[in-house]
Amino acid sequence: MLSLSLCVPYMIMESHFSKTLVVTILVSLSVSLAPCLVLASTSCKFPAIFNFGDSNSDTGGFSAVFGQARPPHGESYFHGPAGRYCDGRLVIDFIANSLGLPFLSAYLDSVGSNFSHGANFATAASTIRPQNTTLHQSGFSPISLDVQYDEFYDFPPRSQIVRSQGGVFEQLMPKAEDFSRALYTFDIGQNDLAAGFFFNMSTAQVKAYVPDVLNQFKSIVKNVYDQGGRYFWIHNTGPVGCLPYVLARLPVLASQVDKAGCATPYNEVAQFFNHGLKEVVVQLREELPLAAITYVDIYSAKYFLISQPKKHGFEQPIRACCGQGGKYNNNLHCGGKIKVHGREILVGKACQDPSLWVNWDGFHYTQAANKRVFDQIVDGSFSDPPVPLNNACHRQQQAH
């Protein structure tokens, strides 16, 4: 399929010619442009995915740099740690699978990686805005979105130098033309909000710096576009006020807890962020004329699981499956150990059946919840414009 940015019929449809003139021109076009004639019903056949984000989509970047996620992470699907902070697969894994692509290798992982169908620049604990602290000082990764972009910036030319060596090198790197035809996915921003909360800022103070965070996000998307990216799938941030880690550690009055058990003040900040993010997406569509940008309401997809758990097949919407102690089973983190008579004992164990729980470890969702989130968003029901994932290369009229 031709890149949509080169598609003559598409450029005509974006103009103000009459329908009759458009039909006349389309009929006379060369058969070589046939893939462009079918609009949103044509699957895009993305050859690769390049992902940017935090632990919600990290497939091994953080583990490669700071040490592997410990058991029982990965137990439900990989039967052991696989660089993911989950019992199994993430939403990005289901996205790749649905597009007929293999799981994304983490860009930072030098062991066994295959970048022929894309790369994952996401790392756990990452933020959009650099935190200017070390991981040990703040708990947030130094590999912020700008660093992830720097990694990507060098990847196209370096990958082609390696690919030109032939043999196995050619098989492990993407083709040059894949970069303009790939899907660029973003799932980041949650930690920018959490950083403020855990640095004892008020919700008003966190809201005050959100515009700067979003401006930095916007700049990165424009930079990727300048490097040839055309198709963007952007997740908003989830309901942070529903995370067991937040509920167990931040002050929340009983009157501030909603019917689902979530902390309203923190969720309101997430919604404020998402409103601003949607405005940024609208601006990007105007400023990047060849881009197809899909805004995905992950917040609502996740909140539905928590507020209506039984409808989605879950029994535990708020407590962490993996951890130990307290109302939210999160006093000790997943995989946590204590010393007894000089011996380390695993006490941060997983629940018996993670598929019945929404939350995995206090921060992240279980594989079952990730799959349910994916099932809700894949058909475009939570997207603006409302196009299915496999049609995300088509520019359409988007609601503002």
Image (tube, grey):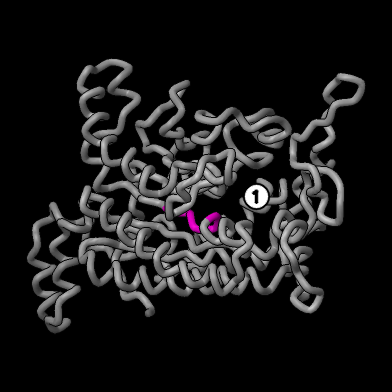
Of the residues shown, which amino acid type is indicated by label 1?
His
What's the residue at 86%, 52% (across, down)?
A: 326
- Residue furthest bottom as drawn: 18
Image-quadrant location for residue 128: bottom left
Q: Is residue 98 visible?
A: no
Q: Nearer the viewer, residue 88 or 346?
A: 346
Q: Residue at x 83, y 31 (%)?
A: 338
Q: Is residue 282 visible?
A: yes
Establish if 164 lies above or below 313.
above
Decide: is 218 above or below 16.
Answer: above
Badge 1 is on which residue?
364
Q: Which residues are magenta?
A: 186-191
Residue 362 in percent (x, y) is at 72, 50
Residue under the image location 82 percent in, 30 percent down: 346
Q: Residue at x 74, y 66 (%)?
A: 251
Q: Position of residue 244 (x, y in %)?
A: 74, 56
